[in-house]
Image: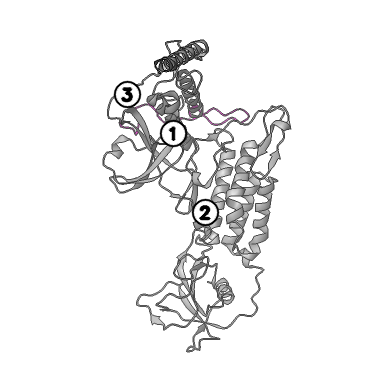
Amino acid sequence: MRRRRAAVAAGFCASFLLGSVLNVLFAPGSEPPRPGQSPGPSPAPGPGRRGGRGELARQIRARYEEVQRYSRGGPGPGAGRPERRRLMDLAPGGPGLQRPRPPRARPLPDGAPGWPPAPGPGSSGSGPRLGCAALRNVSGAQYVGSGYTKAVYRVRLPGGAAVALKAVDFSGHDLGSCVREFGARRGCYRLAAHKLLKEMVLLERLRHPNVLQLYGYCYQDSEDIPDTLTTITELGAPVEMIQLLQTSWEDRFRICLSLGRLLHHLAHSPLGSVTLLDFRPRQFVLVDGELKVTDLDDARVEETPCTSSTDCILEFPARNFTLPCSAQGWCEGMNEKRNLYNAYRFFFTYLLPHSAPPSLRPLLDSIVNATGELTWGVDETLAQLEKVLHLYQSGQYLQNATAGGRAEYQRLPGSTIPQEDYRCWPSYHHGSCLLSVFNVAEAVDVCESHAQCQAFVVTNQTTWTGPSRARRPQALPFHEGPPLSSVSTPLSSTELVCYNTSSLPLPSSVRCTLSL
């Protein structure tokens, strides 16, 4: 028994010694210093990656240089020459930023850049307005959501305005996987924070009505990490596709039009053609009905280099496209076409054609088909979307509508119907049938097409497509004749009540006009 125990112990010792020898002989070496990088002592490499913290510093340096490239205003390869203007003052204590202490940049090991980063060159210009002082007395903080790198919170500022705060998610996958690999929490935070910094830079450089507004930023200590970055942005509602499918066609078209205008701006931005590598509905928000891009940390400006068209294959889950290779060695329009096809497969194909006015459907189908085949670029796509908007706003889409088979209607000014009635889909109000029409003639057509409708009310409310010369009043149909009630305050000239006299005999009154 004693001999067996001694043999087992000897075996363990031999295994230990053999493992130690193998570790000495085959241990991975550290990464050699990059040009211009001090070859100082490197920390012990973390598990799972050659070079350990030297590799982490290399990744931080690469992201830092990317941010500096965008903040300086230089275009990516294959892009046009952009205008050079100042992005913002990233220097701690700069305009609009009130730091709680003097600035200091902390260098990281292995040549990683200091943090917070210094500002890039450029001419003076307007920058973010809010800083750390605006975050001292916020209220109503609510967690909104998180992704791979960042967490988003909703807060209310002392003045009452609601804004969104973005920060690196300390319990997120990006930071957690880096810490497990390199064992350097502060260095991993810097790596993740440069994605947030890149997004902040792009939000400012790509200003547009369909790009989320950047209100400001703040560096402050958090947990065991000094100078953590928080960005302050416009607050939007997440894009929920199931909910959007239940909204009116007019609102869904507005989202597609917003997306078309955004893609046109990205294709002709001051930085060059910008592509969204992580193009999904969750990267967008809705602000007062307008679609805005909010997540730009995975955006890219550089076009794809090539030697032939075989290098220019645009791959998607359902199909692939081969684009031409230019004489300058760049895939022609790959950034633009990637955005456009993603817009087709995530938005256009679901939101554009369904329940649209019949006379607009052929044009809408051509938009969907052309973007699905990439036969159009963003310029032509936007031009066709703007054409749909013009036809809809001006009422020209009604010119070919037939007016046969209408029942007789009566107009009852100064009266209203005090109760809601049947539901329809889609509707602006879930408890009733509230629709958008161009004029009374279209309201009559809508009422005639609903078997339940026997009367409708045209209100003085207008939708987003209703400028003063082409208002789109909302009509509220009803399927039976509830009692009329007099209105104590005079109604506007665009508010009236019409009843279908074929089913509801009423006192003599003015017949419902066919235009406002």
Q: Are marks 2 and 1 in contact (CB under 8 Å)?
A: no
**Disc 2 to disc 3, C-alpha distance:** 44 Å
**What is the quadrant of residue 417 in the picture?**
bottom left
Residue 500 visible here: yes
Magenta residue span: 71-98
503 or 313, which lies in front? 313
Residue 87 visible here: no
Q: Nearer the viewer, mark 2 or mark 1?
A: 2
Could you tell me the amino acid type at mark 1?
Leu
**Residue 196 circle label:** 1
Could you tell me the amino acid type at mark 2?
Met
Residue farthest to the front, as pictured: 1
**Disc 1 to disc 3, C-alpha distance:** 20 Å
Residue tagged 3 = 103
Residue 347 on image: x %, y %: 57, 51
Q: Nearer the viewer, mark 2 or mark 3?
A: 2
Residue 458 on image: x %, y %: 48, 72
**Residue 61 circle label:** none
Q: Nearer the N terminus, badge 1 or badge 3?
A: 3
- SS for dot 1: helix
Residue 355 in the figure: left or right of residue 216: right
- SS for dot 3: loop
Residue 340 on image: x %, y %: 62, 44
Crowding near the residue tagged with mark 2, few <14, some 14–19, many ≥20 C-alpha atoms within 10 Å: some
Would you place residue 301 above or below residue 209 in this image?
above
- SS for dot 2: helix
